[in-house]
Image: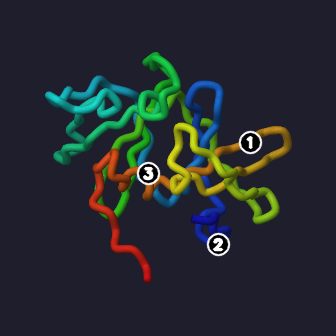
Amino acid sequence: MEFDPTSDSEVLSFRLGREEYAISILKVQEIRGYEQPTRMATAPDYLKGVINLRGHIVPIVDMRIKFGLGEPVYDAFTVVIILNIANHVIGMVVDSVSDVVTLSEDQIRPAPEMAATLDGNCLRGLGTIGERMLILLDIDRLMQSDELGLVTALPRAA
């Protein structure tokens, strides 16, 4: 899926390890400090558990574990980005949030063909701001992937 500059030009950037990622700001409901979630039996390691967010049970996914980026460290900078994906609320643990960036069309490069830790369908492209590079994620596809199974997949457009 390509980057759509009309709806995706504003992105929230965040860090996982040494890399900086970004998602559409339109998917972000709120940003919270990290709190230990309630662990669910037999859940995969990257699914840290659930939290009660104003009466809603919200699954919490640790993206560092999901992407295989080493042991996570939970400190004062660790945050949970609360997402609204297809009317489902999901929490995403990241090392830190950087800022909100507006990208122009000429700052976006197509995603390289990679068979690494990221499913190619979840990579929208690369954003460049001077020497800074942002890995642009399609957070909808990532959270709806069969592997995560957190959100029922949306019907595919014909």
Residue 120, horizontal then vertical, whole percent: 55, 52
**Secondary structure at numbered mark 2:** helix
Residue denoted by label 3: 142
Q: CA distance from mark 2 to mark 1?
A: 20 Å
The kind of residue on which mark 3 rests is Leu
Residue 13, horizontal then vertical, whole percent: 61, 43
Q: Are marks 2 and 1 in contact (CB under 8 Å)?
A: no
Label disc, if present, on residue 144 of the rendered structure: none
Mark 3 vs mark 2, foreground winner is: 3
Q: CA distance from mark 3 to mark 1?
A: 20 Å
Left or right of residue 106: residue 25 = left
**Secondary structure at numbered mark 3:** helix
Residue occupying image coordinates x 60% and y 63%: 8
Q: Is residue 113 above or below residue 3?
A: above
Label disc, if present, on residue 133 of the rendered structure: 1
Q: Nearer the viewer, residue 116 or 69?
A: 116
The kind of residue on which mark 1 rests is Met
The kind of residue on which mark 2 rests is Thr
Residue denoted by label 2: 6
Residue occupying image coordinates x 61% and y 53%: 11
Mark 2 vs mark 1, foreground winner is: 1
